Amino acid sequence: MNAGGRQLVKEMMGSLGVWVKEIVRQAETVDDERSAERLEQRIAAEGQRHLARLLGGALQVALDAGGPQRTCPRCGSRRRHKGRRVRQPLSRLGVLRLEGVYWHCPRCGQGGHDAGRLVTGTMTRWLEELLTLLGTTSASFAKAARLSDKLLGLRVEDETVRRLSLAEGRRAAATQARPVVLPAEASLVGSCDGVMVQTRQQGWRELKSYLFCHEGGRLSGAHLESARRFVPRLREAAVTLGAARVGPFFFLSDAADWIDRGVRSQLPMATRIIDLWHACQHVYQAADRLHGEGTAQAQRWGRLWSERLRQWGGRTVLRRLERDLTRSPRRGRRQRWRALRPLRVYLRRQQQRLNYPEYERLGWPISSGPMESHCKQLGQRLKGPGMRWHRQNVDPMAALICLWTDDRWDAYWSAAA
Ligand SMILES: [Zn+2]
């Protein structure tokens, strides 16, 4: 028979007193850093067990106070008492022991334990959050399980962390970000890029990601899907941030065709800029073609013209490049023209969006550093050595990573509670 929550707590206070005395006895023998560390570890581990008993007792008090939950929460019928049973959900502090009535509803067939009111699943919601956080930020689910042991003092299976993280990720992926009201003069900088992720079904696929930064924070998303499906998300995110009402709105990207077309149609109000880093990639590729891949000369040339691109902008760089070519020695001139052709085509096509000296003069953004580091974060979690993802699990994991890197994690969990 159940001792009752109050009785449990009373017993716990007694054993706590005994334990404190033991600790003090051990403390008398502590004389160096090593033994001090052992004391710290003992207090942490045993203290946590005492706290788990306290939490279990306290929740039992709550269950006892609630009385019998005879009415079915689903259909309102009178349920049948199927006897008292023990539930042992896992909490942040360890396993709890909760005793209550197991009910069965003859009308809707639904069964339920009294403790289900307080802890719905097999673990508390807070522990779910913490394990999901470890699953999101560790290199792998196995490392997350290791961290749980080391940091939380809780042994869990890799598979438990995996299952929890993916389930929460699916919820997160389906949850709309809360609209943000930015002041009218706030500036907004959007960008998008891709990260290659290895899938079980289709090998390497591009995870497309967007990121919008404003003074009050950021909003990102990442999806493994076609450009056609992804592009409307840019508008959704921009609408969430009230992009139509804000002051200057810039969009930085490498101007890949799908991005460019998408931004033009979905975000017509954005000032499109090619981010400097991506533009310089084109310069370095030309340098490799001109002077041999990775040679010192290619590096020098790449650096020089990347600097000039920033100082002069795309139009002037194109003019100077072509002038230099015309004046260069006749010998090999034709090969040089050919080697520089892709860069010249690129500069000619994109010169409107490569006007860096003007952008800098106006105080506009010219590089999407936050996007680069965002992609790195996604890559670190999703591209571990030998990692191959089930296609449908990529978006859920990406959703969690975005919540964490955007600092929207707490808002998500308090809204989802
Ligand atoms: Zn029912």
Image: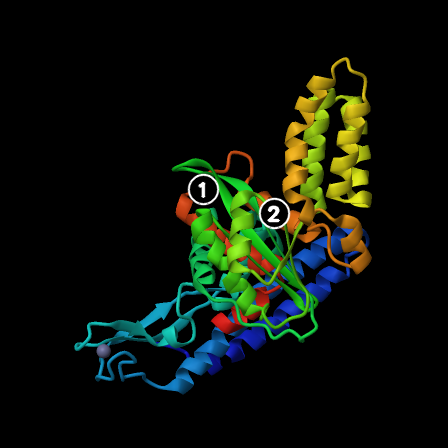
Q: Which residue is mark 2?
A: 375
Residue positioned most to the top: 331
Q: Determine whether the residue tagged by mark 1 lies in a helix, strand or loop.
A: loop
Q: Is residue 67 left or right of residue 335?
A: left
Q: Residue 317's x, y, as percent?
A: 77, 38
Q: Residue 390's x, y, as percent?
A: 41, 43
- Residue at 25% x, 84% y: name it: 76
The amino acid marked with disc number 1 is: Trp
Relative to 193, residue 23 above or below: below
Residue 89 appearing in the image:
yes
Would the CB of label 1 be found within 8 Å of ligand 1?
no
Label 1 Cα neighbours within 10 Å, binned few <14 / some 14-19 / many ≥20: some
**Residue 362 falls in which quadrant of the image?**
bottom right
- Residue at 17% x, 77% y: name it: 107
Mark drawn on residue 389: 1
The amino acid marked with disc number 2 is: Cys
- Residue at 46% x, 59% y: name it: 173
Label 2 Cα neighbours within 10 Å, binned few <14 / some 14-19 / many ≥20: many
**Residue 330 falls in which quadrant of the image?**
top right
In this figure, which colouring scheme has been used for the structure? rainbow
Q: Is residue 397 left or right of residue 37?
A: left
Q: Is residue 2 left or right of residue 239?
A: left
Q: Nearer the viewer, residue 300 or 85?
A: 300
Q: Determine whether the residue tagged by mark 2 lies in a helix, strand or loop.
A: helix
Question: Gap between marks 2 and 1, in whole Å?
Answer: 17 Å
